[in-house]
Amino acid sequence: MKRKLFPFVLLLFFLVSFCAKEEPLVLVSDLDSTIVIDLPYASQNNFVGKVLYDTSLCYLRKSVAERLIRVQKRLQKQGLGLKIWDGYRPRPVQWTMWQLVPDPRYVADPKKGSRHNRGAAVDVTLVDSAGYELPMPTYFDDFSEKAHRDYQNLPENMIQNRGTLSAAMQAEGFIPLSSEWWHFDAPNWQTYSLLDILLKEVK
């Protein structure tokens, strides 16, 4: 009996895995327009110093975006909100970044792919009710120790703001990256396939 069931169970496993990996990318602003979108890679205001994205629109896998919206609602009860710095990142962009900073602590090896390349990671900070950023340890894509989550030689308000962001994200299941206070992974990021599609080609 067990032998007869095994092929069926195996087939079911692969079908479930395939469906999860093919979850669509969605436009975050279509689901919640109150989340501020400001993508440095869509401008020259980034560590590369040139435009890497062909649009300023932010995409995430559907379930990841829905999870992030729940975070937004949590924060709004405190008079705060999210600003997104990065979401889905095409893998060709990952190669450009890796050539400049080939350090896996800060830039994922494009051969293996990034959580961003799966649409299953997001870079965020906090804003107040007027949309202004709260003080944080560093700006986006800072490669110093100050960006680490356990760095403590900071003003108290920065430590508190970092903690508020982390608590809200983790309450909805996001997993923090130790070397970047702004980076959070979806809890099931491994189930999403790597994508090469350019942002302007997302449908």
Image (tube, rainbow, N blue to C red):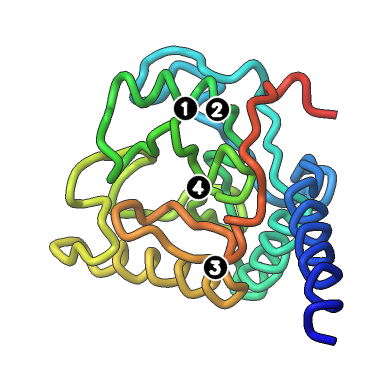
In the picture of the structure, the residue carrying the numbered disc 1 is 94
SS for dot 1: helix
Which residue appears farthest toward the bottom when viewing the image? Answer: 1
Q: Is residue 52 left or right of residue 72?
A: left
SS for dot 3: helix
Query: Callout 4, which amino acid?
Result: Asp
At x 84%, y 78%, the residue is 5
| Sequence-wise first label, 3 or 4 | 4
Which residue appears farthest toward the left when viewing the image? Answer: 153
SS for dot 4: strand
Res. 100 image quadrant: top left
Query: Callout 2, which amino acid?
Result: Arg
| Sequence-wise first label, 1 or 4 | 1
Residue 22: image tag: none
| Sequence-wise first label, 1 or 3 | 1
Mark 2 burial class by Cα count in 10 Å: few <14, some 14-19, many 20+: many
| Sequence-wise first label, 3 or 2 | 2
SS for dot 2: helix
Q: Are marks 2 and 1 in contact (CB under 8 Å)?
A: yes
Front residue (pair 156, 74):
74
In the picture of the structure, the residue carrying the numbered disc 3 is 169
Q: In the displayed structure, would residue 184 be above or below residue 102?
A: below
